[in-house]
Each structure stands twice: as structure tokens, then as C-alpha cells.
Image: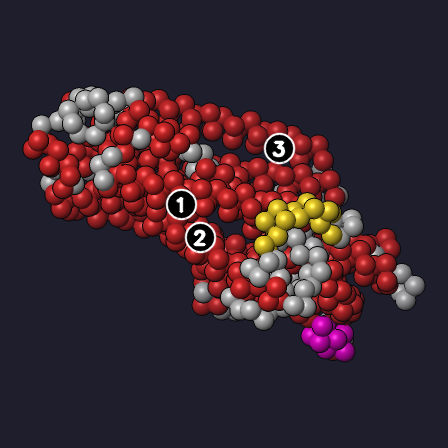
């Protein structure tokens, strides 16, 4: 643990992992959401026996399959990256992190992959009800796979279920229940899964809007648009509600993330009137917002669900970190002494006394003279404390705006889904081409929200890989800069080719649409609606 990695290598490792994670997360939300939309459509088919719903399930299932395959391909490399680029992290928390990761592998490659194959090739080999069960198992498997990944990530955000062992210099697994039921992991899982439902809903609604605008595949498009818009309204409300719950958890587990997210520099001693910054330009150097527009009386109830809880600002959080840093330095020095002589019981007792602040001492190493904590003395201690305390705060500008972009996209989709569901239920959606155009051009909104949501979560955890225990600057592998540049370029090219393949195949099969013989494409009469259909067809669609 005395080794400090080249800062350039650390930054390149972070950049590579961020790149691969952001690329991978382009595929994940659509897989999570579209799987349950397919199950919903197939449920309607099994209940009503109407062939159109079977064709809908098969058509959207084809697009799901393309996305699923590429999602698996991009996810594989990420699991190897922990061992190749983050060896210190893997050593430090491998006993804990490896467990949910292994279970996720079983879920993804045994449960999901098996049932995906049966779902695609079992239409003529299984009864409708049996095939429906398989489709639900695919949806369940996809979301359970996400659960275990987010349990692993939850430990990084709020370490529970493990303790540090000074004899092995590793975090040891102590509670499987504590790991699984980590509040951060559970809230983030539901939030992420429902965000996937929003993504799937927007995708189906946008492609359906394209068909309606071009007067193609009308029956399938109308029904798909209706299911997606209703699914989207419910999911949008859910994702906003769970996002609020996740913010509440972060207020307790990661106050530095919350302060950066809201650009709160000074602690407001009058929480009732504290303003929520709608817009701000944070200045880290000056420790203030050079420009801000806030709404008073909203911040405290929004973040804490009370009117009296004081929310600490960044300046106070830095001051609160200094005693932890001092204690952490003592813990690290005692740990070093104990590792040099395991019979030194006084060193072990000192370490146990300050153990919970060990991570802050670890963080101070990069600011100690010659990166040696033993050289920290009364003369240079204030400087070390100031620099380390400053480092405990994540990038405020990135955190503030990433969060607001995510929230703005989420509320925009809620409004769009609400209008779409309203006019779809009234069978008037074709009379509003502007709504259809907005739906089509909004197809990227859920991905924008998901990507910036991931940035909010991961940037807000900095400077830690395991919050409060293991700093990022020491977690990376000791590769050369040349190696990291080469691998970063290689990953960028590889993943870009995956994105190009995804877009090509999705656009190709979305434009082709379902088989023409399976549904009517008669253009509606002027004025939209169902005026061009026979009366019995209009009545039938009204009932659907």
C-alpha cells in the first residue's frame, strides 16, 4: 500500500473505464426496459389471442435482440478491466466485490442467455403461455443481472458488509445480508431499472411515431405507441420518485456528493429559507457561485424531507474532514508499524482506535512530503490537512450540471409521455403530428438522462473508489503511460465500432418494420384518426 501510481496512469485508467462504462450503458437501459415491454405485449397477446400483439412482440423483440447482443459484448471487457487496470482496488475489495460480480455472471450468461435463445426460437415449439413465461424470465434475468452489479457498486458508494483486516491488508466479507440490503444499492437498483423502463418506452414510442408520421404499419404503431406512452408515464413518475429517495440516502451517506450536486458552499443556518439553485456557475477556487438563480424555501424539504435539518456546505465539510485526516494519518502510521512487526500490540491498538478514518490518512499520502506520512510534522501538517480536505470534494461544476441535465431530461420525458398517453387513449394521436415529431426527436432523451445520471453517481463519489476507505489515486494498476494510451485508443475504436453496428442494425430493421402481410397499412383519411376505417374496425381498436 506504500506504492503511489503515476497520476497520468490513474487519469488514463479513469478515462478508459469511464469510456467503456458510458458506452456499455448505452445498451443496458434499453435491454432492461424493452424486456418488460415485450412481456407486456405478449401478455396482451396471450389474453386476447389477437395476432397483432404477437407480431408486435416479435418485431420489438428483434430490436431487443440486437441491443442485447451488443450489450453483452461491451459488458464483458468491463469485468476484466477491474483486474487489468484496477489491480489495487481488486486486491483491496476482491473478497467482497467479487461475490456479486460472480453471481451477476451466472445470471447474465446462464439465465439470461439461455432464456433469450428460447424466447427467439421457441415460438413454434412452446405453447403461448409457456413462451410468455420464458419472456418474463428474460426480463427478470436482465434486471437481476443489473441488481448484482448495483449491489457491487453500492458497496463502493456506501461500504457495508465488510471490515478491514490489518493482517491481510484487505477488506474481508462479514455480512452477505448487509451487502445485499445496502440502502444505496437497493435504491439505485430500482432507480436504474425504472430508468430502463423509461428508455424502452421512449424508444418504442419514437419508432412508432416515425411509422405514424410516414403512414406505415399503422395498426402496430398505434398499439405500440399506446402501450409505450402509458408505460412511460408510470415509469417516469417512478424514476423521479426513486431519484428523490436516492438523493435522501446520499444526504446521509455522502454529504460531499450532495453539497457538490447542489453547489452549496456555505452552511445555511436558517434551513427553512434555504434556496435550491436552479442555475449556478460554481467557482471551486473562490469557493462560491459566481452566478446563481435559486428558489427559496425548497432546498431543505427537497433534500431532507424536513424543514429544520441543516445541510452542511462544502466549506464546512472540508473543515469537518480535517480531524478525520489527522486520525487517518495516525491509523496509517500504526498500520505500517504493525505490518513491520505483528507482535507490536500497541501499534495494533492504535490502529483499531483510528481505523474508521484510515482512508483519510491514505488520501493524505499524495500531499505528504515525498508521499511519506512519517514526514508529516507540526510544521507541514496544516498544509497537508488543507490540501487533503480540499481533495475530499468532487468536481462541483461537473456534479452540479450533470445532475441538472439528468433531472431536466427526466421531467421533459414525463410531460411528453403524459400528452402522448392522453391523446393515444382518446384515439387522437394521429391528429397531432407535432406531438409525433416531438416524440420522434426525443428518442435520445432517456440516454442523455442515464449517461448524466451515471456521471452524477460516479463523479460524486470521488476522490474514492470505495467511499471513505480507498482513494482512487492509489487504486489503479502500475501500467506505463504508453500502455494506457494504446489500450485507451483501442477501446475507443472497438466500442465505437459497436455503436456504429448497433445504430446501423437498429435503423435498418426499424425502417423495415414488421412483415407487411401481418397487419394493415391503409392510410387514414384526411383529418387523421380512424375515419378511413370501417366502423367495426374503429370500434375494435377503441376497445384495445
Residue ID at (63%, 49%): 293
Q: Nearer the viewer, mark 2 or mark 1?
A: 1
Contact between marks 2 and 1 (CB within 8 A): the answer is: yes
Mark 3 element type: helix
Look at mark 2 in the image and give the residue it sits on.
240
160 to 450, vertically: above or below: below
Location of residue 439 in the rendering, given as x and y in whole percent from the top left corner = 37, 33
Furthest residue in direction right, as rendered: 379
The quarter of the rendered structure image containing the N terminus is: bottom right
In the drawing, what numbered circle is on residue 523? Answer: none
The CA distance from mark 1 to mark 3 is 40 Å
Q: Residues within 10 Å of mark 2 (few under 14, many from 20)?
A: some
Rendered image quadrant of residue 538: top left
Mark 2 element type: helix
Look at mark 3 in the image and give the residue it sits on.
487
Q: Earlier in the sequence, mark 2 or mark 1?
A: 2
Amino acid at each position: 500500500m506504500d506504492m503511489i501510481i503515476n497520476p497520468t496512469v490513474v487519469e488514463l485508467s479513469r478515462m478508459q473505464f469511464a469510456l467503456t462504462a458510458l458506452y456499455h450503458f448505452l445498451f443496458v437501459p434499453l435491454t432492461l426496459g424493452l424486456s418488460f415491454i415485450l412481456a407486456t405485449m405478449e401478455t396482451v397477446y396471450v389474453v386476447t389471442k389477437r395476432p397483432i400483439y404477437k407480431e408486435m412482440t416479435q418485431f420489438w423483440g428483434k430490436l431487443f435482440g440486437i441491443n442485447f447482443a451488443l450489450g453483452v459484448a461491451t459488458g464483458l471487457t468491463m469485468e476484466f478491466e477491474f483486474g487489468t487496470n484496477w489491480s489495487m482496488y481488486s486486491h483491496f475489495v476482491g473478497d467482497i466485490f467479487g461475490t456479486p460480480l460472480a453471481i451477476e455472471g451466472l445470471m447474465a450468461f446462464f439465465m439470461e442467455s439461455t432464456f433469450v435463445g428460447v424466447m427467439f426460437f421457441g415460438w413454434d415449439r412452446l405453447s403461448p403461455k409457456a413462451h410468455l413465461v420464458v419472456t418474463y424470465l428474460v426480463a427478470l434475468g436482465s434486471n437481476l443481472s443489473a441488481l448484482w452489479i448495483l449491489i457491487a457498486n453500492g458497496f463502493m458508494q456506501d461500504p457495508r458488509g465488510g471490515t478491514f483486516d490489518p493482517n491481510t491488508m484487505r477488506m474481508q466479507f462479514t455480512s452477505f445480508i448487509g451487502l445485499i440490503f445496502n440502502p444505496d444499492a437497493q435504491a439505485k437498483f430500482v432507480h436504474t431499472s425504472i430508468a430502463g423502463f423509461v428508455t424502452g418506452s421512449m424508444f418504442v414510442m419514437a419508432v412508432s411515431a416515425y411509422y405514424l408520421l410516414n403512414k406505415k404499419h399503422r395498426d402496430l404503431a398505434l398499439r405500440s405507441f399506446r402501450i409505450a406512452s402509458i408505460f412511460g408515464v408510470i415509469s417516469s413518475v417512478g424514476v423521479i420518485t426513486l431519484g428523490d429517495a436516492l438523493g435522501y440516502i446520499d444526504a446521509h451517506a455522502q454529504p460531499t456528493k450532495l453539497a457538490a450536486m447542489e453547489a452549496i458552499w456555505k452552511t445555511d443556518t436558517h434551513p427553512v429559507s434555504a434556496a435550491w439553485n436552479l442555475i449556478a456557475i460554481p467557482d471551486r477556487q473562490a469557493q462560491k457561485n459566481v452566478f446563481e438563480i435559486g428558489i427559496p424555501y425548497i432546498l431543505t424539504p427537497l433534500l431532507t424531507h424536513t424543514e429544520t435539518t441543516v445541510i452542511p456546505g462544502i466549506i464546512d465539510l472540508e473543515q469537518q474532514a480535517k480531524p478525520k485526516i489527522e486520525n487517518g494519518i495516525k491509523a496509517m502510521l500504526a498500520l505500517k508499524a504493525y505490518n513491520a512487526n505483528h507482535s507490536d500490540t500497541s501499534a495494533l491498538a492504535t490502529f483499531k482506535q483510528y481505523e474508521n478514518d484510515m482512508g483519510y490518512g491514505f488520501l493524505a499520502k499524495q500531499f505528504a512530503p515525498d508521499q511519506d506520512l512519517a514526514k508529516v510534522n507540526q510544521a507541514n501538517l496544516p498544509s497537508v490537512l488543507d490540501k487533503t480536505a480540499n481533495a475530499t470534494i468532487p468536481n462541483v461544476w461537473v456534479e452540479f450540471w450533470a445532475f441538472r441535465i439528468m433531472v431536466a431530461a427526466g421531467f421533459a420525458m414525463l410531460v411528453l409521455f403524459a400528452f402522448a398517453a392522453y391523446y393515444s387513449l382518446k384515439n387522437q394521436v394521429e391528429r397531432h403530428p407535432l406531438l409525433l415529431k416531438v416524440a420522434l426527436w426525443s428518442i435520445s432523451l432517456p440516454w442523455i438522462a442515464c449517461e448524466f445520471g451515471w456521471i452524477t453517481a460516479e463523479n460524486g463519489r470521488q476522490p474514492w473508489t470505495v467511499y471513505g476507505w480507498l482513494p482512487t489515486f492509489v487504486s489503479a494498476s502500475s501500467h506505463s503511460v504508453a500502455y494506457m494510451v494504446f489500450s485507451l485508443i483501442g477501446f475507443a475504436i472497438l466500442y465505437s465500432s459497436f455503436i456504429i453496428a448497433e445504430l446501423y442494425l437498429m435503423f435498418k430493421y426499424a425502417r423495415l418494420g414488421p412483415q407487411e402481410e401481418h397487419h394493415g397499412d391503409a392510410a387514414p383519411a384526411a383529418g387523421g384518426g380512424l375515419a378511413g376505417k370501417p366502423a367495426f374496425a374503429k370500434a375494435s381498436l377503441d376497445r384495445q
